Image (cartoon, helix red, strand yellow):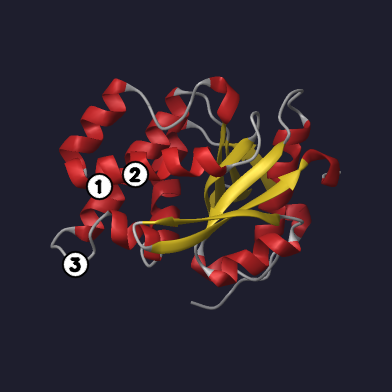
Amino acid sequence: MATKTLSSSTIRAVFLAAEDLRLAASILYQAYVDDPLFRTIFQVEKSGYESRLRAAIREELYTFWLAKQPMVGLFSEERLLAVVCVTHASEGFGAGRFWHWRLRMLLTAGFFSTSQLLNKEKLVASVVPYEDYHMVSFIAVQPNHQHVGLGHQLMAAIDNLVLANGTSEGAGVLVTVPTYESFFEDGGYQNVNQLNVNGIDGKIMFKHKDMMS
């Protein structure tokens, strides 16, 4: 499908509602199905990889929504074109998660994938050199609306979330794909640490609040 040209004046950034989660999950699945870390965590070599990944993304979004963690969508009229999901470390939302999330994940994604996802988050939290910060969990643009500036609008939404919070020191993200590293560098993020998760090398990139406007 051809990329459609959009004017920034036609795009509105709003917090996702419950009825938006299904479409948001679809957009995120398309963005992360080939991500090397997710392919490892959800065992791409075994049958059912796509089902496990879809289930995990659905459960993540549902848990974010229950915990009132910020999920911002970019809409053109009523169409959801892009989404970013951010968590805030100081609000008690971390690798422990809620018991019902663990149960639903175990039933849908399986024990191995659930434990690996939790271990990944614990490892990331252990190497972020800040105490109070936001973390980008998911970020994606619909494939047929990429390269028209929506990614940068999502970046601006992240900045606004951090700036609106009185205690957050900035925003971090785990990057395992070189292309995404360049994207975040362009947005003002800097490499602050490195780590290896399940054999996949990654970088923790961070944008301090002082660099946001």
65 left or right of 15 in image:
left
Position of residue 67 relative to residue 123, above or below, is above
Q: Alpha-carbon distance for marks 1 and 2?
A: 6 Å
Whether residue 30 is visible, yes or no, is no
Query: Residue 163: x, y in percent?
Result: 78, 33
Q: Are marks 2 and 3 in contact (CB under 8 Å)?
A: no
Please tell me the numbered disc located at residue 35.
none
- Residue position for label 2: 117
Query: Residue 208: x, y in percent?
Result: 76, 43
* Element marked by disc 1: helix
Position of residue 130 relative to residue 8, above or below, is above
37 left or right of 170 in image:
left
Please tell me the numbered disc located at residue 45.
3
* Residue at figure coordinates x 36%, y 62% from the top left: 199
Say which amino acid is labelled 1: Ser
* Element marked by disc 2: helix
Q: Say few, some or many: other residues with alpha carbon within 10 Å of mark 1 (under 14 / 14 to 19 / 20 or more).
A: many
* Residue at figure coordinates x 57%, y 46% from the top left: 84
Q: Alpha-carbon distance for marks 2 and 3?
A: 17 Å
Label 2 vs 3, first from the N-terminus: 3
Q: Are marks 1 and 2 in contact (CB under 8 Å)?
A: yes
What residue occupies the far left of the structure in this picture?
Answer: 47
Position of residue 133 relative to residue 143, above or below, is above
Whether residue 45 is visible, yes or no, is yes
- Residue position for label 1: 113
Say which amino acid is labelled 3: Glu
Q: Alpha-carbon distance for marks 3 and 1?
A: 13 Å
* Residue at figure coordinates x 27%, y 30% from the top left: 102
61 left or right of 82 in image:
left
* Element marked by disc 3: loop
Say which amino acid is labelled 2: Leu
- Nearest the viewer among 196 and 53 is 196
